[in-house]
C-alpha cells in the first residue's frame, strides 16, 4: 500500500506541512512617501540574510530585512550544519537551540553494491574536546525560525514580510530600493545592501549580473519521509546499491523521525513520470523495506550547478550565499558556505560604518569569500564528477577505485562521495600577517580558530565563547607571570582586548587540560591576534606591541 503522498503542486516538490506564517505590517512610507535611510538593508530572509542581521546588530549596526514571502522555507532543504557554522551560530545566540534539536553525527560511511560493511569510514571530528560536534542534521526551517526569534527580540534588526524589492538604484554614495507590498509600493535607501536572496536572486537580475561555471547533467530525487526506524545517525552513502542499481543513494537522519533519502536518477529521464507517487514509492520501498510504515514530508527532483559571480562586491551592493555562488549538495557546502559569508561580511561593514576601517576593507570580502567559493566549487565538482562520471575513462577510474577500496587503504582515500564542509583557510588574504616564527601550520593566519575546554574564573567554559565580535589577543603566560602588555593594546585607536591564558589558577582563563596550548602550538610568550570572525590574523612567539598594532592595521585594511 502506498504511503500518504504530499500535495506536490509542481515537479519542484512541496512540504507536507506549512510552517509558521508571519504578519504583514504596512510600512508607513507607503502613505507618507518618506524615503527612510538605514545603514544596511538585507534582501532575503533565508539563513544567510537572517544571520547577517543578527551579526550586524551585535556590532551595534541597524539593519532591515526585506523578504517577499510570509514564512520561512518549506521542506527540509539544507539539513547538514557543519561545526564551523555551529560555532558561528553559537556566537549569534542560536547554537545551543540548534544542537538541542538537531541530530548530532561525526561519522560517515561509504558502501558499494550489496556489501553490508563500508569500504570507507571517516570521522569529521577526531578531537572530541570541543563544544560543537562535526555536524548536526536539522531542517533549514528550524534554523531560520531560531534566527527570526532572535531578531524579534532585538532593537537593531527588523524583518518586513511580503516586501519584494523590484528596483535597485546602486548609486556612488547610497543604494535606493523600490519595494512592492500587498498594499502598495514605497522607497527606502541604505549605505550598503546585502543581497542574500537565493540562487535565483532577483537582486542579481535587477543589476544585470550573471553567473559563470558548470551545470551538471544528472537528476536526483529527494524523499524526506517520516518513519520509526533504528538506522544509525550517520551519513550513509551507497554506490551501485541493489535498491538503486547503477546509481548512487544517500541516507541522513533528521529530527522528528524524518529521514532524507536521496536517489540518483540519471540525466535522460521523464521528470513528471519519475515524480509519480507509485514510482517514488517503488524506490523508497526498495530502500527501507516493504513493511516499514512511513509518510512523506517532502519530495523533489533536482539538478545542480557549480556557479559563482565573478565578483561579489558591486559598489554598495554585496552578494552573499546562493545569490553569489552555487555548489552541489554533496559535501554540504551551500548553506554552510553562505553562513560563513555573513560571518566574514558583517564585521567589515560594521567597522567601515563606525569609522574603524576604510571602505577598502569591504574589498577583502571579495578576496576571502571568492577564494572560499572557489574551494567549495572545486571540491563539489570533484565529488560530482566521481559520483556521476560522464566519460569512459572517468567511469573506469571510479569503478577501479571502488573495487580496489575493498582491500587496499590507499584506494579508499580516492573514493569521493562528497568532501564535507570545512572552513576555508584564508591563506592568501591581504589581512593576514605572515608568520616570522616557527609554528605548526594548524592555526596559521587565515585559519578559523579551533575550540578547546577552558576554565573561566573557576567555571567550565570554552575558548570560542571568549572570542569574536572584536579583535582579541591571546597571550600564553608563563607560570606566575604578571603580563602588562595588554595596556598598550587597550589604549590604541582600535582597542584589542587581551585574554591571558594560564595553565593553573582560579582567576581568568585557565587551560587546565593544556589543549589550547596544544592546538595553537603555544608556549610561554606566544601571542595570537584574532579577528572579530574568529579567524587568526597573526601570531608571534614573543609579544611585541608594535608588531601587533601593525598587524591590526593590516587586518583592518589600513596598512
Image (cartoon, rainbow, N blue to C red):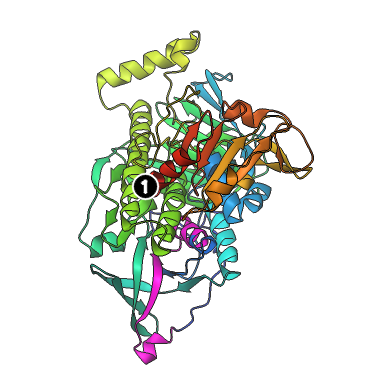
332 left or right of 486 in image: left
Q: Please, which residue is most extreme toward the bottom here? A: 32
| Residue at image point 68% right, 28% down | 514
Residue underneath mark 1? 273
Relative depth, front residue between 466 and 250: 466
Q: Quadrant of residue 150?
A: bottom right
Disc 1 secondary structure class = helix
Q: Give x and y (percent) for residue 258.
A: 60, 47
Q: Which segment did they paint magenta?
A: 27-55
| Residue at image point 45% right, 18% down | 413
Q: Is residue 8 magenta?
A: no
Q: Give x and y (percent) for residue 267.
A: 30, 37
Q: Quadrant of residue 121?
A: top right
Q: Is residue 462 above or below residue 504?
A: below
Q: Give x and y (percent) for residue 232.
A: 65, 33
291 left or right of 425 in image: right
Q: Is residue 54 magenta?
A: yes
Q: Quadrant of residue 131?
A: top right
Q: Is residue 444 above or below residue 27?
A: above
Q: Give x and y (percent) for residue 339.
A: 46, 50
Q: Please, which residue is most extreme toward the top here? A: 407
Q: Please, which residue is most extreme toward the left here? A: 208
Q: Is residue 473 above or below residue 440?
A: below
Residue 61 visible in this rendered orientation of the protein:
yes
Q: Residues within 10 Å of mark 1 (few under 14, many from 20)?
A: few
Relative depth, front residue between 160 and 58: 58
Relative depth, front residue between 402 and 500: 500
Count every numbered label the image shows and give the total.
Answer: 1
Residue 304 visible in this rendered orientation of the protein:
no
| Residue at image point 55% right, 24% down | 122
Amino acid at each position: 500500500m502506498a504511503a500518504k503522498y504530499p500535495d506536490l503542486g509542481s515537479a519542484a516538490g512541496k512540504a507536507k506541512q506549512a510552517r509558521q506564517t508571519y504578519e504583514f505590517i504596512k510600512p508607513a512610507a507607503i502613505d507618507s512617501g518618506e524615503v527612510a535611510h538605514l545603514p544596511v538593508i538585507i534582501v532575503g530572509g533565508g539563513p544567510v540574510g537572517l544571520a547577517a542581521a543578527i551579526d550586524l546588530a551585535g556590532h551595534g549596526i541597524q539593519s532591515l530585512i526585506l523578504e517577499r514571502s510570509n514564512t520561512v522555507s518549506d521542506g527540509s532543504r539544507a539539513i547538514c550544519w557543519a561545526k564551523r557554522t555551529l560555532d558561528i551560530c553559537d556566537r549569534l545566540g542560536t547554537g545551543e537551540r540548534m544542537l538541542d534539536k538537531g541530530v548530532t553525527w561525526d561519522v560517515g560511511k561509504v558502501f558499494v553494491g550489496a556489501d553490508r560493511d563500508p569500504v570507507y569510514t571517516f570521522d569529521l571530528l577526531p578531537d572530541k574536546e570541543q563544544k560543537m560536534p562535526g555536524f548536526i542534521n536539522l531542517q533549514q526551517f528550524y534554523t531560520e525560525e531560531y534566527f527570526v526569534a532572535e531578531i524579534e527580540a532585538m532593537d537593531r534588526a527588523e524583518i518586513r514580510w511580503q516586501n519584494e524589492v523590484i528596483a535597485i538604484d546602486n548609486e556612488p554614495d547610497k543604494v535606493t530600493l523600490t519595494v512592492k507590498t500587498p498594499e502598495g509600493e514605497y522607497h527606502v535607501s541604505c549605505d550598503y545592501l546585502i543581497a542574500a536572496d537565493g540562487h535565483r536572486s532577483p537582486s542579481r537580475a535587477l543589476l544585470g549580473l550573471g553567473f559563470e561555471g558548470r551545470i551538471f547533467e544528472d537528476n536526483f530525487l529527494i524523499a524526506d519521509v517520516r518513519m520509526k526506524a533504528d538506522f544509525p545517525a550517520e551519513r550513509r552513502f551507497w554506490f551501485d546499491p541493489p535498491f538503486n542499481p547503477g546509481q548512487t543513494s544517500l541516507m541522513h537522519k533528521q529530527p522528528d523521525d524524518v529521514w532524507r533519502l536521496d536517489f540518483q536518477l540519471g540525466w535522460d529521464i521523464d521528470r513528471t513520470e519519475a515524480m509519480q507517487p507509485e514510482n517514488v514509492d517503488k524506490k523508497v520501498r526498495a530502500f527501507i523495506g516493504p513493511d516499514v510504515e512511513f509518510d512523506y514530508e517532502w519530495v523533489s527532483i533536482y539538478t545542480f550547478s557549480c556557479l559563482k559571480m565573478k565578483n561579489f562586491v558591486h559598489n554598495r551592493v554585496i552578494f552573499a550565499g546562493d545569490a553569489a555562488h552555487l555548489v552541489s549538495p554533496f559535501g554540504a557546502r551551500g548553506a554552510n558556505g553562505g553562513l560563513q559569508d555573513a560571518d566574514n561580511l558583517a564585521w567589515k561593514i560594521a567597522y567601515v560604518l563606525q569609522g574603524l576601517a576604510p571602505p577598502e576593507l569591504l574589498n577583502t570580502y571579495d578576496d576571502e569569500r571568492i577564494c572560499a567559493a572557489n574551494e567549495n566549487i572545486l571540491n563539489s565538482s570533484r565529488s560530482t564528477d566521481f559520483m556521476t562520471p560522464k566519460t569512459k575513462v572517468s567511469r573506469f577510474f571510479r569503478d577501479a577505485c571502488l573495487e580496489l577500496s575493498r582491500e587496499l587503504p590507499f584506494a579508499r582515500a580516492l573514493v569521493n562521495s562528497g568532501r564535507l564542509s570545512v572552513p576555508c583557510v584564508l591563506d592568501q588574504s591581504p589581512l593576514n600577517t605572515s608568520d616570522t616564527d616557527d609554528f605548526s601550520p594548524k592555526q596559521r593566519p587565515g585559519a578559523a580558530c579551533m575550540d578547546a575546554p577552558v576554565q573561566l574564573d573557576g567555571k567550565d567554559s570554552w575558548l570560542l565563547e571568549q572570542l569574536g565580535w572584536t579583535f582579541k589577543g591571546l597571550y600564553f603566560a608563563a607560570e606566575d607571570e604578571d603580563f602588562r602588555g595588554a595596556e598598550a593594546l587597550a589604549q590604541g585607536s582600535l582597542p584589542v582586548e587581551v585574554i591571558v591564558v594560564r595553565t593553573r589558577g582560579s582567576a581568568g582563563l585557565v587551560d587546565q587540560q593544556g589543549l589550547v596550548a596544544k592546538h595553537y602550538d603555544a608556549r610561554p610568550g606566544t601571542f595570537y591576534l584574532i579577528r572579530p570572525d574568529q579567524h587568526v590574523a597573526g601570531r608571534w612567539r614573543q609579544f611585541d606591541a608594535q608588531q601587533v598594532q601593525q598587524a591590526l592595521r593590516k587586518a583592518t585594511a589600513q596598512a
